[in-house]
Image: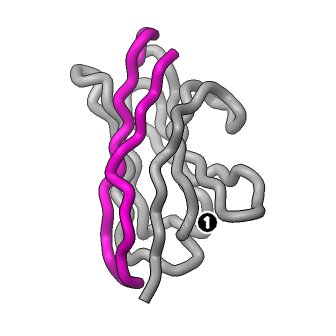
């Protein structure tokens, strides 16, 4: 399993980013996928999940209505659209293969929200 996240950066509160996760080494279309994040000195936090087809999604209450998870099975890509970002969203974001928060993940991409 190989996962590579990209798209992070520094934005002001209220801004937007689109994270991308390139997957390889496994049959992407047969895996549920997650986005999780880790803020400084905190544990992993589940952010969003999507089923194998992309037809069902779930979100943590803290991001519901602001973040959108999606996938493109033809491109082996997972996405996370982050809108109306808040300073509390500052964290390193990881995509995870499977349904477990501590499953295989990449190196992550840093999102910093700061005025």
For image coordinates 51% across by 44% down, the residue present is 108
Q: Where is residue 99 drawn, in percent x and y?
A: 63, 30
Looking at the picture, how far across and down is residue 89, in whole percent? 54, 70
Rendered position, 49 above or below 14: above
Left or right: 26 as drawn, with respect to 100: left
Give how far across and how far down residue 113 sits, in percent.
46, 76
Q: Secondary structure at mark 1?
A: loop
- Say which residue label 1 marks: 61
Frontmost residue, 67 versus 96 = 96
Q: Is residue 62 above or below residue 37?
A: below
Q: Is residue 73 magenta?
A: no
**Region in magenta:** 1-28
> In the image, 60: left or right of 115?
right
Q: Is residue 54 above or below residue 19?
A: above
What residue sits 53% from the left and 43% below the top? 94
Q: Quadrant of residue 10?
A: bottom left
């Amino acid at each position: 399993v190989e996962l590579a996240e990209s798209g992070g950066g520094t934005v002001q509160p209220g801004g937007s980013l689109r994270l991308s996760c390139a997957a390889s080494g496994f049959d992407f279309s047969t895996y549920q996928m997650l986005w999780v994040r880790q803020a400084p000195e905190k544990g992993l936090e589940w952010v969003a999940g999507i089923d194998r087809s992309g037809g069902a999604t779930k979100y943590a209450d803290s991001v519901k209505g602001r973040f959108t998870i999606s996938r493109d099975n033809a491109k082996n890509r997972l996405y996370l659209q982050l809108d109306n970002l808040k300073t509390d969203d500052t964290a390193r974001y990881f995509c995870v293969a499977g349904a477990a928060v501590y499953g295989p993940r990449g190196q992550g991409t840093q999102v910093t929200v700061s005025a």
